[in-house]
């Protein structure tokens, strides 16, 4: 009896392409994890984007690829919330697209790329010309590609009314020869098949559960004191950007109803790219609730160091280490990086049962405090119990870590990426 063993195949030169690989957004984080995994399999990885924090020797900066580029924002502002476009706008889209195609060809030629990984640019139309350019380059070169889709246009209300439905059908995402499609949850997989007839593979967001999480050290030992907390305070962490879909008002309500002076809510990230109205609403809720909430974005960065004011900056994992509880009351998530991060560092989580969590994560058996759109008495009492019972927290941490290792480790992504490359090149089996 023979056994089929899937390997990584011959080493390949792989190019990641997105609007940016910079900061701590989900696309950047997951792309970096994939690159780490692929390098471990013997492949070489290269980067193209409009904003980059990747090593210069493997990077190709194309400023026009960034969705913050003035030309891009000008045209994007004329594409959604309206049902038609003028010929001038069409010409503007194609002008930007052609220049981006030149950049893509130069990127491929400079690094002699054999595989491309478009990161979300063929899914959500934040940069329509880039998606069109990417689609045409793939069609013209027949280069193998693994299109990694994190969010689709139909998942965002702001893209409901569109002047570019023709482009959305053509390129977001496209059905092309030698392109493997990867989504991050089963709901996206089903919708992609139903709407466009495109088959895909689910590769969930992952973390390196094979490597033990970081802990307290000499650098982060003073974090509580630096942000004004004592060792006796309940450090309740909201580890997300300040955008409406994160449901941060529920975290505020939970802390209010705990009626515990020791309970302090720490919000680790800044406001997102969706305006300031939500942040203002949260500040009003905080004033009404009369609770202690700290906005700590100026003290949390990608790397340790100091901020513009000379104050110490910590990584997000430094912050997690000190947290007693994590709140994750999102209305919607493509997957849920903050959930994985919390269980990786062994912290209990209050989680709103958003659709992807309910379908793909909850059935696996994780121990969490669950809420369904409402902070009920049961949620409040369970939160109090968990915060007061260290043995329960330790038990939950062990169960959750083992499940993370089983379902969301690098090994999971490694196996599935090897299979995608085998499909593209007919090797490795």
Image (tube, rainbow, N blue to C red):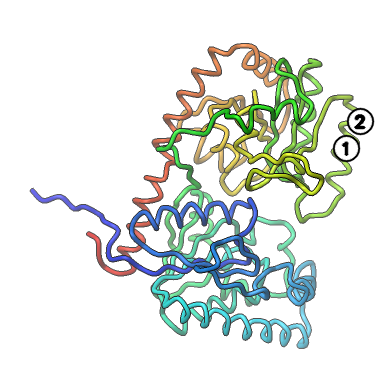
Name which residue lies at 63% across and 67% down: 19
| Residue 287 circle label | 2
Judging depth in this view, the residue of 127 and 294 nearest the camera is 294
What residue would you read off at disc 1?
Answer: 283
- Left or right, 187 with respect to 307, comes to left
Q: Is label 1 in a helix, a strand or a loop?
A: helix
- Judge whether 247 appears above or below 78 on screen: above
Can see residue 133?
yes
- Judge whether 207 appears above or below 105 on screen: above
Name which residue lies at 71% across and 63% down: 159
Cα distance between the residues tagged 2 and 1: 6 Å
| Residue 259 circle label | none
Q: Is label 2 in a helix, a strand or a loop?
A: helix
Can see residue 352?
no
Residue 405, quarter of picture: top left
Q: Quadrant of the C terminus?
A: bottom left
Q: Residue furthest left?
A: 1
- Left or right, 80 with respect to 368, comes to right
Judging depth in this view, the residue of 219 and 348 nearest the camera is 219
Residue 134 screen position, x and y as percent = 55, 76
- Judge whether 277 appears above or below 192 on screen: above
Name which residue lies at 48% across and 65% down: 147
Whether tag 2 and tag 1 are in contact, CB under 8 A, the answer is yes
Residue 353 screen position, x and y as percent = 61, 35
Residue 151 screen position, x and y as percent = 60, 57
Q: Is the residue marked by circle 2 packed among few (<14), some (14-19), or many (20+) residues within 10 Å?
A: few
- Judge whether 361 appears above or below 388 on screen: below
């Amino acid at each position: 009896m023979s056994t089929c063993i899937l390997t990584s195949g011959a080493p390949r030169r792989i190019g990641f392409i997105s609007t940016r690989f910079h900061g701590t957004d989900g696309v950047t984080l997951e792309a970096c994890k994939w690159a780490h995994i692929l390098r471990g399999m013997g492949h070489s990885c290269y980067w193209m984007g409009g904003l980059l924090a990747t090593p210069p020797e493997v990077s190709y900066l194309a400023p026009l690829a960034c969705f913050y580029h003035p030309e891009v924002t000008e045209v994007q502002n004329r594409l959604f919330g309206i049902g038609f476009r003028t010929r001038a706008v069409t010409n503007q889209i194609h002008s930007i697209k052609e220049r981006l195609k030149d950049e893509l060809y130069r990127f491929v030629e400079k690094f002699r790329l054999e595989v491309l990984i478009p990161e979300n640019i063929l899914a959500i139309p934040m940069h329509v010309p880039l998606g069109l350019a990417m689609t045409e380059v793939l069609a013209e070169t027949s280069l193998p590609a693994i299109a990694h889709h994190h969010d689709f246009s139909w998942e965002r209300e702001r893209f409901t009314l569109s002047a570019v439905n023709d482009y959305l059908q053509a390129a977001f995402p496209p059905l092309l020869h030698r392109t493997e499609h990867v989504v991050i949850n089963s709901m996206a997989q089903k919708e992609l098949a139903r709407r466009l007839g495109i088959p895909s593979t689910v590769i969930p967001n992952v973390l390196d559960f094979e490597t033990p999480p970081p802990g307290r050290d000499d650098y982060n030992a003073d974090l509580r004191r630096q942000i004004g907390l004592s060792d006796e305070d309940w450090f309740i962490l909201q580890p997300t950007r300040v955008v409406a879909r994160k449901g941060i008002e529920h975290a505020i309500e939970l802390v209010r109803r705990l009626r515990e002076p020791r309970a302090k809510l720490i919000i680790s990230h800044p406001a997102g790219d969706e305006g300031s109205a939500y942040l203002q609403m949260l500040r009003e809720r905080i004033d009404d609730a009369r609770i202690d909430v700290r906005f700590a974005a100026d003290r949390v960065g990608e790397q340790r160091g100091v901020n513009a004011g000379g104050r110490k900056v910590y990584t997000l994992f430094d912050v997690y280490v000190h947290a007693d509880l994590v709140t994750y009351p999102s209305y919607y998530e493509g997957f849920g990086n903050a959930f994985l991060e919390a269980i990786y560092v062994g912290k209990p989580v209050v989680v709103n049962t958003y659709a992807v969590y309910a379908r793909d994560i909850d059935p696996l058996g994780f121990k969490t405090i669950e809420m369904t759109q409402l902070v009920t008495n049961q949620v409040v009492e369970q939160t109090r119990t968990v915060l007061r019972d260290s043995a329960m927290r330790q038990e939950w941490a062990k169960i959750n870590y083992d499940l993370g290792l089983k379902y969301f480790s690098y090994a999971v992504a490694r196996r599935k990426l090897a299979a995608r490359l085998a499909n593209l090149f007919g090797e490795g089996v």
